[in-house]
């Protein structure tokens, strides 16, 4: 019985070690706390997501901006959510297989908006509101994306935070840019991929030691998320799609990514 108890305690301690966020209290944590963040900018039927117009609309209202970045075939960084072009541009192809020049020929939905580069996005926002940048990458191109994005972001004077579903991204930032607030994105996962299971339960945090965890707002009662809050990670909720959801779950999170409505001022 004693041996069994020791094994159980050791296993629990191992899980806590694996899931532990950072112990530090980064000064930018206060900037993220309480922030309302427009998911892919403030977009609607006329203004496409992740467009310069969507970012300008959000900045004009004082909201933080969440966007997504990919690396192109020729090493440029563009702002776009999906890995493929079908939904937003009506053509087939993966971002990582296409050059920037080819992407610039396309338009977002039925608008005149092009797929913006990260540089264009930063120039448009110009430090007026904080940016929450989601890195879209797989294990093959992750370092390449982080390095190329950092070459651009290191000269940006505005405030920004980084996040990704891929733990390799906040891990890269832990080793190379400790000055940047880093986060781990997660959501409940029921598939067969063991790595995704570990990441969705924050059990790969030992590599990144994130400052904040961004979790699906529909599942705030998951034990793994509650543990992150208990261990000191700043809880960010995504994606709130109504004022009611935001109001009902306001106390469960400390920052709020929203889409499809304008949040109340209070």
Image: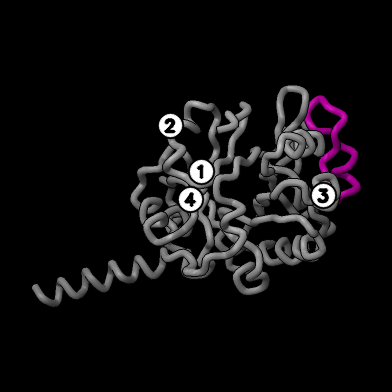
- N-term-proximal mark, 4 vs 3: 3
At a point 76% along the width and 33% down the height, the residue shown is 57
Q: Are marks 4 and 3 in contact (CB under 8 Å)?
A: no
Whether the residues at callouts 1 and 4 have beta carbons within 8 Å, the answer is: yes
Q: Position of residue 167 (x, y in %)?
A: 55, 61
According to the picture, the residue beneath numbered tag 1 turns out to be 237
Tell which tag, 2 or 1, sits nearer the viewer: 2
Q: Residue reaching furthest top?
A: 45
What separation in Å lies between label 3 and label 1 (alpha carbons)?
25 Å
Disc 3 secondary structure class? loop
Residue 249 locus on image (x, y percent): 44, 36
Specify whether 31 is left or right of 230: right
Give the residue at x 41% y 63%.
19
If you read the primary sequence from the N terminus, does the residue marked by circle 2 or circle 4 appear first? 4
SS state under label 1: strand
Q: Secondary structure at mark 4?
A: strand
Give the residues drawn in magenta, as a range: 99-116
Q: Which residue is mark 4?
A: 235
> How would you rate the neighbour count of disc 2 (Cα within 10 Å): few for under 14, some for 14-19, many for 20 or more?
few
Element marked by disc 2: helix
Give the vertical position of 95 relative to 91 (above or below).
below
Label 2, on which residue?
248
């Amino acid at each position: 019985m004693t041996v069994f108890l020791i094994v159980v305690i050791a296993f629990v301690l191992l899980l806590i070690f694996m899931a532990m966020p950072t112990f530090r209290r980064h000064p930018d944590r206060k900037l993220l706390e309480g922030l309302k963040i427009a998911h892919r900018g403030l977009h609607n039927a006329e203004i496409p997501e992740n467009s310069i117009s969507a970012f300008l609309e959000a900045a004009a209202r004082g909201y933080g901006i969440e966007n997504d970045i990919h690396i192109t075939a020729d090493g440029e960084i563009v702002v776009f959510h999906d890995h493929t072009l079908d939904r937003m541009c009506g053509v087939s192809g993966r971002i990582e297989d296409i050059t920037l020049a080819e992407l610039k020929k396309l338009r977002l939905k039925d608008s005149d908006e092009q797929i913006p580069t990260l540089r264009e996005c930063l120039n448009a926002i110009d430090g007026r509101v904080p940016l929450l940048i989601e890195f879209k990458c797989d294990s093959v191109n992750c370092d390449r994306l982080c390095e190329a994005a950092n070459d651009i972001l290191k000269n940006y004077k505005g405030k920004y935070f980084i996040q990704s579903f891929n733990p390799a991204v906040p891990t890269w930032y832990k080793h190379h840019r400790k000055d940047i607030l880093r986060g781990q994105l997660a959501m409940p996962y029921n598939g067969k991929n063991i790595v995704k299971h570990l990441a969705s339960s924050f059990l790969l945090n030992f590599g990144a030691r994130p400052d904040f965890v961004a979790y699906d707002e529909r599942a705030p009662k998951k034990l793994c998320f509650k543990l992150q809050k208990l261990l000191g990670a700043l809880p960010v909720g995504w994606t709130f799609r109504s004022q009611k959801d935001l109001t009902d779950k306001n106390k469960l999170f400390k920052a709020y990514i929203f889409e499809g409505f304008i949040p109340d001022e209070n």
